[in-house]
Image (cartoon, helix red, strand yellow):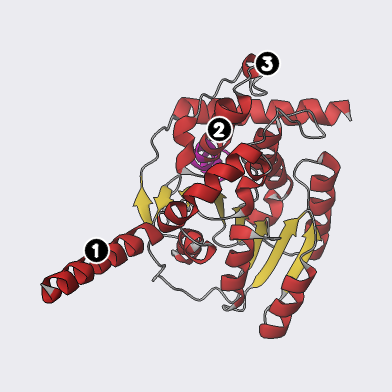
Amino acid sequence: MLWSFFLLCLSLFLIGLKARIYFRGQKCETLRDISNLTILITGGSKGLGQETIKLLAKFKCRIIFGCRSKPTEFLEKLLKTYPLTKIEYIPLDLQSWSSIKQFANRVNKEVDRIDILINNAGIMGTLTRQFTEYGIESQFGTNYLGPFFLNQLLLDLIRKSNCPRIINVSSIAHVFQALDFDDLNCEKWANSVFWSRIYTYRAYGNTKFAQILNGQEFYNRTGVKACSLHPGVVRTEVLQHQLSAWWFNLIMLIAWPIYSFFTKDCYYGCQTILYCIMLKDEELINGGFYKDCRLSKARYTSKDKASKLWDISLQLISKIESSI
């Protein structure tokens, strides 16, 4: 009887361990020499951005990162740990048009080329319908249009690389998309009492779908390779807006043990980002969608929508530029 109980407990433990490893995700086993590369990443004050910077610092490449607030303690510790790695912080607020331009101007003056640009910064699930300083729904502006504008401003530097690439940190959440080119600001959902519970996630899904479309169209318009990826469901501060709601906090308090079991920490969350960095130029699939350190397939793709989104994005940039 005792042995049966012991074997049952052992079996449950091994099954649980195997399940945990599965949901934790794959670790990047692909490596190459990137010590001579200049890598720019948006976001870096916390979460996936910060963890990606920590991993890249080990390879002695040049790292430039932009975010709204300077992570002083993190940066000082990193520079002390990796003295041979050049790591630079430049202020960047993707909700501010002037901040994007100031960031790009400084990078253009101080850097001779960009080999890899990672569009990582993003927000998710605003409880109310909010807007950037340039009048775009905040999730769409922060996650897609702001980065799109930044990429355009840095395009000449990117093209100076021998094998440049753009990496868009998208999400499986693109399945929630309901992208309407005539309503990018989600006016049709503006007065819905369900914004914070339903439509904010549709708006977020739109941005992640837009990143995938951007990755598909980038080479056609610029000659620069691009891809997108799903990092997994990662325990980061991306839920900061939702966490400010009492009802969401209550749900997370009750469900946290289960949530933690089925999600990734930041280390494993950035493994697919690292994988897309480490792939050789001939191995990276242009416009590809990656998940768990391998090529996957996005639920929604469209060459026509990718082309149309690019044109609309350029029109929005022109419109914003002429209004400020």
Name the N-terminal-most of marks 3 and 1: 1
Query: Alpha-carbon distance for marks 1 and 2?
Result: 33 Å
x and y percentages locating residue 184 in the rendered image? 64, 23
| Residue placed most toward the observer, 2 or 111 | 2
Name the N-terminal-most of marks 1 and 2: 1
Res. 15 mark: 1
Question: Which residue in the protein does label 3 denote?
Answer: 191
Name the N-terminal-most of marks 2 and 3: 3
x and y percentages locating residue 268 in the rendered image? 47, 64
The answer to whether one can see residue 226 in this image is no
Position above or below: 145 against 77:
above
Q: Is mark 2 on a helix, strand or loop?
A: helix
Q: Quadrant of residue 314?
A: top right
Q: What element carries label 3?
A: loop
Res. 201 mark: 2
Secondary structure mostly seen in the magenta stretch: helix
- The number of numbered badges drawn on the structure is 3
